[in-house]
Amino acid sequence: MTATTNATATATAAGTASGGAAVITLDHVSVTFHERGRVIEAVKDVSLAVAEGEVYGIVGFSGAGKSTLVRTINLLERPTAGRVLIDGRDVTALTGGALRDLRKRIGFIFQGFNLIGNVTVGENIAFALKAGGWPKDGRKARIGELLRLVGLESKEDSYPSSLSGGQQQRVSIARALANKPEILLCDEATSALDLETTEEILALLKRINRELGITIVFITHQLDVAKTVFDHVAVMEHGRIVEQGATFDVFAEPAHDTTRALVERYLGVAVPPQLVPALPAGTIVELRYKGDDALEPLISEVARAHDVTIDVLHANVEYFGAQAIGTLLVLVSGDDAPRAAALAALRARVYGYRELDRRALAAGARDDTESEA
Amino acid sequence: MDSTWQILHDNLGKALADTAYMVVVATVIGVVLGTLIALLLYVTENRLFTPHAGVNTVVGFIVNAIRSLPFLILMVVLIPLVQLLIGDPYTPTGGAISLSIAAVPFFARVAESAFSEVDPGLLEAAVSTGATIPQIIVGAVFPQALPSFIRGVVLTVISLIGYSAMVGTIGAGGIGDMAIQYGYNRYETGVLVAIVVILIALVQVIQWVGDWAARRVTH
């Protein structure tokens, strides 16, 4: 159940995947660079619509054009073709004061934080407030308010270099929110952070999304981030969006090879190659199931009914919001006929079924071919 | 020996004052105008500001043209101009004018490179706040470029002290003039040694103060 490219956004700002009014609409946007005589098509004919108040994710391998795409939204990168609409208004050709006013409504946070290193945390935020035209006496209070929001009350007079990566990203979030934007763009905002800090930053962004109603567009190659916070997701490859839809749907039933490769890499389970030769004879199968289907009863039921042995080699459950995707690697052994019947029974009960090649497993390679960007 | 002390006593104060006058005037003019030209080059070069290949190329060419002349030659070339401006080119003010004309493009390149070192990601962040170009220059580019900028001022002052000795050779005054007149033309080795020591000490102190200041503004 995944919407295909270009299906959601047509020429107007009308429809989004979730049915709400689109805050951001990209309408057949392309970005082409000319670099030393070479033509690089970073973004090719991308259309998408982001609904008000949602967290919209764009995932893909590095070099897919995600960063260029997100930069078209606040026109850091101007589309060479197509239109950018914010709240239904075409902003593609804005310049000067009108463009600056638009940017004040769109916060932006980056992988590298991009704080002004030689001035204090307070002055970093004051920079954005000055841009937003805040009077001097109003700034002080607003800085305090923003630092409280991101949990860094005591750091106003610190310099960025004295802060941890997570703290620096909090400062950059405070700076991005300074002028009360409606939209927050995040470009690999957690990719430079460790796992724990990533979770803290995601929780903060989620809170901002919920409490302040700010629409978030988040670019990442980390599927952990995708499954934790995205409502909708678009998968990008070679400058195109190859698949988009509700996050759970896209990851549960990836329609495109790139999505499958990403999901495989993330959900895929593996047996240590050196253990494979020691496994008893039989068929190794990867089963994938959705939601709360408990597979344990199914497995024992199938094993009993067909008189085969089913060993669970590896199991993994990932939650996408409230919904789960489980992956189970089992070894089915027994005589040929009952084994075939058991496999058919299993196949009928799961949405993802794949027999794995023993030799490939032993060689340590996954038997799927991944298309790397 | 007596004559060495006598010469130093009679001339050193005035010579140092003339050098200081020429170097300070040229530094101030060089830093102010050089910074403005550097900003013009910087904003017309960077695609996030107001890219303009024409302006950038023309201004860059003029800066390079002046810089490609060795100072000794530039000084000679400028003599008629200085004459036109103040009448007598062989005075500290005449020297200050030629030094300033050399200092402006020199510092323009120094400042431009200080600005160019500022992380492009930081510029994207600054532009994304909706800030105007002057706000970005003052609030983001300048604080980040300040350490390099200060080192550039030091480099310029030290180069100008060297150049000021050259304007001395054509009689514009200063300690260069004194070194040539007494140390070289009159074989007063003591005077020459004293001036060498003063120059070394002066340059060391300026370098030390500059490094200290640059460290102070780096966080």
Image: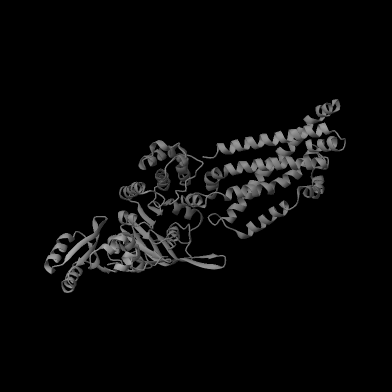
Q: Is residue A279 left or right of residue B219?
A: left
What's the coloring here? one colour
User: Which quadrant would residue B88 be assigned to in this image?
Assistant: top right
Residue A174 or A37: which is nearer the viewer? A37
Residue A116 % position (x, y): 49, 44
Note whether A117 is above or below B188 in the view shown: below
Residue A256 location, x and y as percent?
34, 68
A290 relative position to A152: left or right: left
Q: Give the camera-side residue of A366 and A190.
A: A366
Q: Residue at x 80, y 34 (%)?
A: B192
In this rendering, is residue A147 above or below B131?
above
| Residue A31 percent location from the top left of the image | 47, 65
Furthest toward the right, the residue is: B186
Frontmost residue, A321 versus B76: A321
List the single residue furthest toward the bottom: A337
Q: Is residue B33 left or right of residue A170?
A: right
Q: Can I make out residue A338 in this image?
A: yes
> Compared with residue A68, is residue A149 higher up or lower down, i.e. above or below?
above
- Image quadrant where one finds the N terminus of chain B: top right
User: Residue at left 59%, top 36%?
Assistant: B213
